[in-house]
C-alpha cells in the first residue's frame, strides 16, 4: 500500500437517538462477531435496563461478569460503621475471599476493629505560568488575599463541594496550586475539576495582570501514587486498629504474636529499602475486590492502596495493629454506585446513598486490616503457597 492510500475500518455502530437499549447492545455484539469472529454470548446476558448506563459507559455492548464472594461477619466499632458486616468481594483470585474471611473472624473474635476517618481532602492542581519567579510569588500572595472570592467562585458550581484551602508551591516562574476540597458522599474528582476551572477563570478575570494557566499541573497525582498525598491526604484518611489477642492469634493462625512482632521488623525494613507505597502486606487486594463490587472507580486503587502499618507488642504479648489508609478515594453517591449489582452490594453494607461515605470508608479500612492479619499469618505459618495451590488453581 502506498503512502497516499488509506483504509477505512468499519465504525462501531451507534444510535444517536437512543444508544442505551438492549437492541442497540445486540447490534454491537453482532458487529463484534462479524469483525472478530467472537460471539459475546456471556457478555450479552444481564438483568438491568441499559438506560441506567448514561454517564457510565459509551458503546455499551455487554457486561464483564466478575464473581462475588461474601466474607464475614466483620465486627466494626467505628464512628460511622458499627456492627457486624458481611462484605461483598468481587475477584477472580482463588483464596482471596477465604483469606479475608479468616482475618475477619480473627478481628471479630478479638472484639472487632476500631475505625476513624481523620481527614477529608480531594484536590485539583492548576498551575499558573508567570513572567518570572517574582511575579509568581506576587500572584501567590494575591491568591491568599482573595481566598474568599476564589472559594465563592468555585462553590457556585457544586452543591456539596467546599473549598477548604489552597496549597501553593513555587518552581521557577510557575505557581502550582493544590486546591483542597471536601466533596460530601462523592469521590469528587469531576466535581473538583469543574469547581477549579471556575476558580481559575475568576483569578484570570480579576488579577491585575495577564495570566496563563493549565487546569492540571499534575501535583494532585490523580490515579497515581505520590508521597505528597500520603502526607497531606487525598480522598479520605482513615484508620483501622485492633488489639489482637495472643491466644486467638495462636489458635486461628498457628503463630505466636512474639514471632509476628519479629516478622514486622523485617518487613518494615524491606518496605523502607525499596520505597514501597505501603509497608503492609496487600491492601490493594481487598480494596480492588470491594471497589469492583460496589461500583467505585477501580483505577483509584492506584492511590487508595497507599498506607502505613503501625504495630506494638503489648506487655501481655497481645498485639496492637493499625493500618492508616492515607488516600482512600471512594464514594456512595454518583459514578457507578447506582448501577444495579453495585447498588445491591452497597445496600448489603448499609452504605448506599447520601450520608454514607464515611461509613463506607471505615468498612474499607477494616477489610484491609483483616487481609493484613490473614496473609501475614499465612506467610509465618508456612501455608501461604499451599493455600493458593489448594484454593487458587483453576486450570487443567
Image (tube, rainbow, N blue to C red):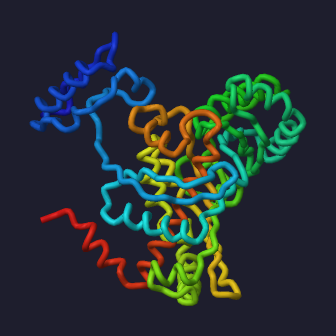
Residue 5 visible here: no
Q: Quadrant of residue 365?
A: bottom right
Residue 230 shown left or right of residue 134 in the figure: left
Q: Is residue 150 above or below residue 95?
A: above
Q: Is residue 186 above or below residue 156?
A: below
Q: Is residue 118 above or below residue 210?
A: below
Residue 56 visible here: yes
Q: Residue at x 67, y 37 (%)?
A: 183
Tell me where residue 385 appears, x and y as whole percent.
32, 78
Tell me where residue 225 appears, x and y as whole percent.
55, 57
Q: Looking at the image, which residue sits at the far top?
A: 17
Q: Residue at x 48, y 36 (%)?
A: 337
Quadrant holding the C terminus: bottom left
Q: Quadrant of residue 326?
A: bottom right
Tell me where residue 63 appears, x and y as whole percent.
29, 36
Relative to the observer, which residue lies in front, 42 or 182? 42
Relative to the observer, which residue lies in front, 218 or 210? 218
Amino acid at each position: 500500500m502506498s503512502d497516499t492510500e488509506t483504509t477505512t475500518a468499519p465504525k462501531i455502530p451507534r444510535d444517536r437517538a437512543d444508544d442505551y437499549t438492549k437492541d442497540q447492545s445486540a447490534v454491537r455484539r453482532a458487529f463484534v462477531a462479524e469483525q472478530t469472529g467472537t460471539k459475546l454470548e456471556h457478555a450479552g446476558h444481564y438483568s438491568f435496563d441499559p438506560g441506567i448506563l448514561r454517564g457510565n459507559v459509551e458503546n455499551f455492548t455487554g457486561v464483564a461478569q466478575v464473581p462475588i464472594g461474601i466474607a464475614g461477619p466483620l465486627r466494626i466499632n467505628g464512628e460511622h460503621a458499627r456492627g457486624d458486616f458481611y462484605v461483598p468481594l468481587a475477584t477472580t483470585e482463588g483464596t482471596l475471599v477465604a483469606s479475608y474471611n479468616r482475618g475477619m473472624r480473627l478481628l471479630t473474635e478479638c472484639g472487632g476493629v476500631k475505625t476513624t476517618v481523620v481527614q477529608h481532602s480531594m484536590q485539583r492542581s492548576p498551575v499558573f505560568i508567570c513572567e518570572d519567579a517574582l511575579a509568581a510569588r506576587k500572584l501567590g500572595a494575591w491568591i491568599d488575599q482573595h481566598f474568599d472570592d476564589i472559594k465563592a467562585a468555585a462553590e457556585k458550581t457544586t452543591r456539596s463541594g467546599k473549598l477548604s484551602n489552597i496549597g501553593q508551591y513555587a518552581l521557577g516562574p510557575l505557581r502550582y496550586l493544590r486546591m483542597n476540597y471536601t466533596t460530601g458522599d462523592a469521590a469528587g474528582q469531576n466535581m473538583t475539576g469543574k469547581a477549579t476551572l471556575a476558580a481559575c477563570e475568576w483569578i484570570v478575570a480579576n488579577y491585575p495582570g495577564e495570566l496563563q494557566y493549565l487546569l492540571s499541573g499534575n501535583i494532585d497525582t490523580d490515579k497515581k501514587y505520590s508521597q505528597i498525598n500520603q502526607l497531606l491526604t487525598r480522598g479520605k484518611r482513615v484508620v483501622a486498629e485492633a488489639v489482637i489477642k495472643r491466644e486467638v492469634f495462636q489458635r486461628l493462625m498457628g503463630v505466636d504474636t512474639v514471632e509476628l512482632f519479629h516478622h514486622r521488623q523485617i518487613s518494615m525494613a524491606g518496605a523502607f529499602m525499596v520505597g514501597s507505597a505501603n509497608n503492609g502486606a496487600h491492601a490493594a487486594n481487598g480494596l480492588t475486590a470491594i471497589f469492583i463490587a460496589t461500583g467505585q472507580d477501580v483505577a483509584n486503587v492506584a492511590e487508595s492502596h497507599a498506607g502505613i502499618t503501625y504495630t506494638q507488642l503489648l506487655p501481655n504479648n497481645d498485639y496492637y495493629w493499625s493500618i492508616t489508609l492515607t488516600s482512600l478515594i471512594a464514594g456512595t453517591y454518583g459514578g457507578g454506585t447506582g448501577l444495579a449489582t453495585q447498588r445491591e452490594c452497597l445496600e448489603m453494607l448499609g452504605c448506599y446513598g447520601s450520608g454514607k461515605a464515611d461509613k463506607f470508608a471505615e468498612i474499607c479500612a477494616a477489610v484491609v486490616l483483616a487481609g493484613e492479619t490473614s496473609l501475614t499469618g499465612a506467610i509465618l505459618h508456612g501455608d501461604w503457597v499451599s493455600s493458593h495451590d489448594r484454593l487458587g488453581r483453576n486450570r487443567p
